[in-house]
Amino acid sequence: MTRIIPADKGTHFVAGAGITAVVLLAAPLAVAGGLCALAAVLREWYGLRTTGRWDWADIAWTLAGGAVVLVGAVAPQGLPW
């Protein structure tokens, strides 16, 4: 059976969500989102240095996981616009 979403992308999604959720326990939304983005880029930089591979899709999936957590954190309070 062919996977619609590769397992590696799911791992990036969960990592982004986890990083954002943990940081949100002690920091504002912008810091949590920023650290999620930093982690995504640093992970790909590490991959580039060790395997010679950079994958923008991995960054996108990590950020998507973080975005889900950020939206979930904001939604109970109402959207700011």
Image (cartoon, rainbow, N blue to C red):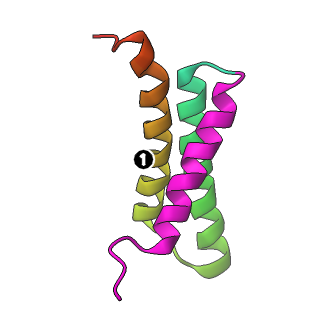
Query: Is residue 7 highlighted in magenta?
Result: yes
Give whichever of 59, 69 is nearer the camera. 69
Picture coordinates of residue 17, whole percent (x, y): 55, 44
**Pointer 1 local density, CA inside 10 Å: few below 14, some 14–19, many at least 20:** some
Task: Choose top left, top right, bottom left or bottom right for residue 6.
Answer: bottom left
Closer to us: 31 or 26: 26
Q: Was residue 25 drawn as part of the magenta stretch in this picture?
A: yes
Q: Which residue is mark 1?
A: 64
**First to last magenta residue range:** 1-26
Quick check: can you spot residue 36? yes
Q: Residue furthest bottom?
A: 1
Residue 45, percent from left and from top: 60, 62
Say if residue 54 shows up in the picture. Answer: no
Identity of the residue drawn at 43% across and 39% down: 68
Q: Secondary structure beneath disc 1?
A: helix
Q: Main secondary structure of the magenta part?
A: helix
Q: Residue at x 50, y 24 (%)?
A: 73
72 sits left or right of 41 in the view: left
Q: Residue at x 53, y 43 (%)?
A: 37
- Amino acid identity at mark 1: Ala
Residue reaching furthest to the left: 81
